[in-house]
Image (tube, rainbow, N blue to C red):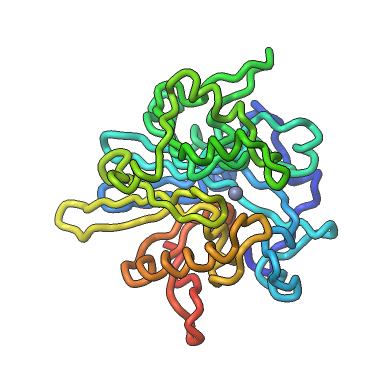
Amino acid sequence: MDGSERIAPPTEVAPFASGQVPNADPDSTARLVRARTQVGDFELTICTDGTYLLDGGAMFGVVPKTLWQKRIPADDQNRILLGLNTAVVRTGKHTVVIETGIGNKQSPKMREIYRNQELLPISLNAAGIWAEEVDIVINTHLHFDHCGWNTTLLPDGSVTPTFPNARYFAHAGEVAHGHLQLDRDRVSYLSPNYDPLIQSGQMTLLTTEEIRGNAEIVPGISVELFPGHTAQLMGVHIESKAAGGASEHACYISDLIPTSAHLDPTWVMGYDLDPLTCIEQRKRFYQRAIPEDWLVLFTHDHHTPMARIGLNDKGKPIVRSKT
Ligand SMILES: [Zn+2]
């Protein structure tokens, strides 16, 4: 978002109730399908579960508001508008979904607070992607705003897998941490987003040792640990080579760098469990992402879902190109 845009008042933030389909006009499609590009031979689409509002101070940790509000304006309750981006990769053999937004399990009270819109199913359909074709779902970590549509809450109170034919992947340490229900972050972990899938065998839990041995989920899609936001946060690498072309690389970096306003290595979030590790991991990420010209996918940036990164004259990382 640039500084000229204002956050719509709350009554206008959530125009669609769950299950309602907006008019299939071009504006609506552009709102629902945030970006589409090629990464080598792979088709990459950025879908969205809509937007939500979080406290700006929590999103920028110790950074003074006088600095961060130049990049993302806050409303009169100090909230900033964030996106809920789902990356969908069609490799030719597989349809891979990375992250599944907030979902439809929030209580009316939490929906009132977050103003989230539960758009992912219609966003996928607007992009011509059908739940049945998805055969891989990857959760970078298991916070509620990253795995919400893993399962769908039905009217009778039960949950069902949103992607019936998919194998789901998450880190075993995330599940263990969520089950601890610690004071600091228990509200972030909602077990109906993953426990039913683990119990049915539909979710595969990866260990750090397994990832170090073989990080590939399917050919061209692999995971890498970038700890700090949580202890086992995984980034997802997307690598493909078009016939006669160079190899191309995109990376869904998740909450290590949640928006393009968070590129400065020290602008870490109040939510991060280990901010010092986040700073070191961001520096490690840039050591490859900048010289190798990766397309960086931002999980919570509604207006800039992807960018290539460069350095400014002070040596700070900045958006070099949005394609
Ligand atoms: Zn998040």
Q: Residue at the spot x=70%, y=35% of the render?
A: 16
Residue 187 occupies which quadrant of the picture? Answer: top right
Quadrant of the frame with the C terminus = bottom left
Front residue of 223 and 248: 223
**Quick one: which residue is furthest to the right in this view?**
76
Counting every numbered tag in the picture gives 0
**Quick one: which residue is furthest to the top in this view?**
156
Q: Is residue 111 left or right of residue 313?
A: right
Residue 158 occupies which quadrant of the picture? Answer: top right
In x, y percent, where is residue 239? 29, 52
Front residue of 291 and 38: 291
Q: Residue at the spot x=43%, y=45% of the render?
A: 45
In x, y percent, where is residue 88? 42, 41
**Quick one: which residue is furthest to the bottom in this view?**
313
Front residue of 153 and 39: 153
Residue 217 occupies which quadrant of the picture? Answer: top left
> Please, is residue 61 above or below residue 231 in the view?
below
> Please, is residue 169 above or below residue 141 in the view?
above
In x, y percent, where is residue 241? 22, 53
> Please, is residue 12 above or below residue 136 in the view?
below
In x, y percent, where is residue 137? 43, 34
Q: Residue at the spot x=19%, y=58% of the render?
A: 245
Quadrant of the frame with the N terminus = bottom right
Q: Residue at the spot x=76%, y=62% of the render?
A: 74
